[in-house]
Amino acid sequence: MKEPQKRFLKQFSRMPMACGSLVFILIISVIAILNSLGINLSPYSFDQTSSDILQSPTFAHPMGTDELGRDLLSRVFFGSQLSIGIGIFTAVMSFLIGTVYGAIAGYCRGKVDAILMRIVDVAYALPDLLVMILIGVMIGRGTLGILLALGLVSWRGTARLVRAQFLQLHQEEFIEAARALGQNHLDIICKHMLPNSLGPVIVAVTFTVPMAILSESTLSFIGLGLSPPACSWGTLASDGWRSLRTTPHLIFFPGIFIFMSVLSFNFLGDGLRDALDPRTKASSKQFF
Amino acid sequence: MLNTGCARQSPWQPGILRVNLGTEPPTLDWHLSVDMISFEVIQNIMSGLTQYSNGVDGAKLTCQAACAKKWEVLDGGTRYVFHLRDDIYWTDGKKLTAKDFEYAWQRLIDPATGAAYAHFLYDVINAREINQAQIKDLSKLGAKALDDLTFEVRLNKPAAYFIYLTAGPTTFPMRKDIVEAYPGRWTEPQNIITNGAFKLDSWQHEYKIDLQANEKYFGGRPKIDKIKMFMIPEQSTAFSLYQNDQLDFIDNRSFTTSDIAQCKKDPNFKTQALLRAQYLGLNTLKSPLNDVRVRKALAMSIDKNIFPKILRRQETPMQSWIPPVLTGFKQDSGIAFNPEEGRKLLALAGYPGGKNFPRTEVLYVSREDTKLGLEAIQAELKKNLGISIELVNQEFKVYLTTRKLHPPHMIRASWSADFPDTDNFMSVFTSDSGNNYTGFKNKEYDRLVEAARGELDNEKRALLYSQADKLLCKENAVLIPLYMATQCVLYKPWVHGIDVNALDIQNYRTAYLEGSN
């Protein structure tokens, strides 16, 4: 293994919170993937109604049942598909669009950069929620609408970040050397500039996952998300909110999952940043 | 709660009743409104020829004198003469005359008005012809002011339920000068002129309507000074406000199903059976529902006994369109729960086991309990027929427009009786009804309903109605009746004198607030 990778792993493994978060994310992801492959870890289906209405957590239903007698555990598992899926998809969208956009602006500089960045400024000025609602209304309810809406508002930060990295790298000697040796633009971008700017970008992208999970919850909460019986953690929380007073387990469990995964992605992002940044000294690490 | 040390305020304000309308009333023009929210406001600011006695049983509501001090039924039930009181004034001081009724009734059936309830007056001479633009002259209508205080109505043939119409908002008087002076804006607070117990003081759209006691109300000034009608669509929010003493009187619109258990513990909780049928209207023109076998299969595969269990408001499951308390009800007029037969019919229609069943949408109003009921239906259809239906929710006003202009496959709708007679239910699905969004047009059905309307012998009438009901629900499966709703109300101990009745008319004129702080 190369030296930087070793150093990264060593740094990362010293942070128990980040490692724990990674484990939690992996577990959730496995549940989500199994669920989307049709393998259900719970004995009930997510839309299977029964006459056991609004039961508190028991052995048969570890998270209780909802107003239609559906097992909440299987609904939370089913919801993880959409919540985690949306989180990861948004991160990928944000990474792809943001990196390409930022790279063009940062590499070309001058007029191209000015025009591209003003577009980003305009996009930044639009309120996220409004844009998402607009796209949701245009495309219609459902997973596709949410995915597109979240993807389209999440790339701007990444674009700015990549551009800034590129502008910085232009000054570096190895870039000048590559240029002097006559390498073409694509090679310079792909072989030299991108790998050197990826660290901060990966960290930023990690933070878009919890942002997306929360945004999806928000959209579903205000009724623009999925149409029933499909559910995500957001819709579960939104439905559970009604019965906060009488059957708090309906909001407690999906709430805990949203909370835990958002926290985990944030810790993971923190951990990655510290481990990837050679300037942070191991001694100055936070207590976790 | 934190006690901040301030002097404790009274939880209620003397003379001010705070209620929740739920949503913005689409219109306060009583010729155009079709919904309970608008009617709730209109009932309190307007008064008609007669008014309902306060009663509990839906079938026993009777009409009492209001603007008309007495009326005569002449010529074997085809001529009504109303004698108006001569001490009734509009809020601008002008005296109410029979001309105001004449104008209102003419405007109601004028095709240019486009009133959905115009067909209510079809029994009046020439009303149908005018409304269908066969007669252009509005003054040909058989409802005339004989003098300032006498209003005469002539009917084509006797109609047993006619008197009930005069208590409903549709036939309330209207001021010609005001309506014509402010076209399209006459219902705004600065323009509207009314004659009821309260007057419209302010209307902050999407937030609140304020009603003020009408000092000149002919029935005596109401005991409360002001009603604040808030528009809080979220049931849980409204319930929190009630619990924090921000609302004094709430009903179904203001608590969620899961709050019911808690509400039932309150001594001031009442449940009232309503003449309000909840149903799925099926679009008989749109594939795959244009196949009667598919419609029947759907109707057979929803177990209606789940509704009282899930919604927990003592709902009565329904099979037929005629409610159990009204003339013509028969248990076997509708389609009974029979998923096996349903599967067979669906297979015959070309969708064995629900395979290849096209995308089918149900449109509903964004309300939490409506959605819950629909999710249950969705699960029933999936379990029993193997088909998935898609739920589409819309805000109330948008929903009303969509179902009128682009009716989807199914609509989740609710029919609240305007008067306690079977005719009110049956005439929803006649060919010329403005409330029939199913595309169902059936000459035989129209004939039966028409015949029952004029039939004075109650037994024959019941027979005609049950035949029509069978044709509608069993043979054509135009709609799937779900359940009869109830109204649950919860009021603070200082609220007195509000009666709830089967028509869900909430009249606040008898309400008063009293109690220790």
Image: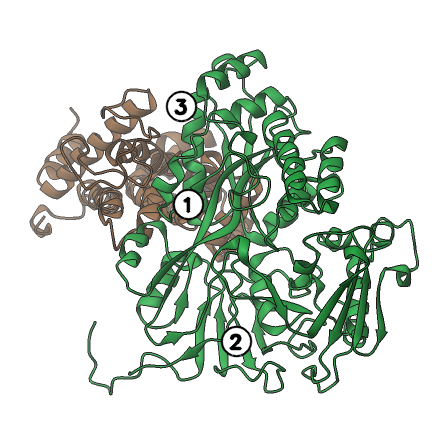
The answer to whether marks 3 and 2 sit on the same chain is yes
Frontmost residue, A136 versus A156: A136
Q: Quadrant of the C terminus of chain B?
A: bottom left
Q: Is residue B337 left or right of residue A25?
A: right
The subunit letter for the residue under badge 1 reads: B
Q: Is residue A225 visible?
A: no
Circle 3 SS class: helix
Q: Is residue A26 left or right of residue A47?
A: left
Vertical placement of B475 versus B345: above or below?
Answer: below
Frontmost residue, B172 versus A195: B172
Q: Is residue A206 visible?
A: yes
Residue B44 location, x and y as percent?
57, 71
Residue at 54% of width from left, 65% of height from top? B206
Chain B painted colour = green
Vertical placement of B508 versus B289: above or below?
Answer: below
Which residue was labeled with disc 1? B315
Residue B239 location, x and y as percent?
35, 62
Q: CA distance from mark 2 to mark 1?
A: 29 Å
Circle 1 SS class: loop
Which residue was labeled with disc 3? B383
The subunit letter for the residue under badge 2 reads: B
Residue A182 location, x and y as percent?
44, 29
Amino acid type, label 2:
Arg
Which residue was labeled with disc 2? B509
The tag earlier along the polypeptide, 3 or 2, is 3
The answer to whether marks 2 and 1 sit on the same chain is yes
Say if mark 2 contacts mark 1, CB within 8 Å.
no
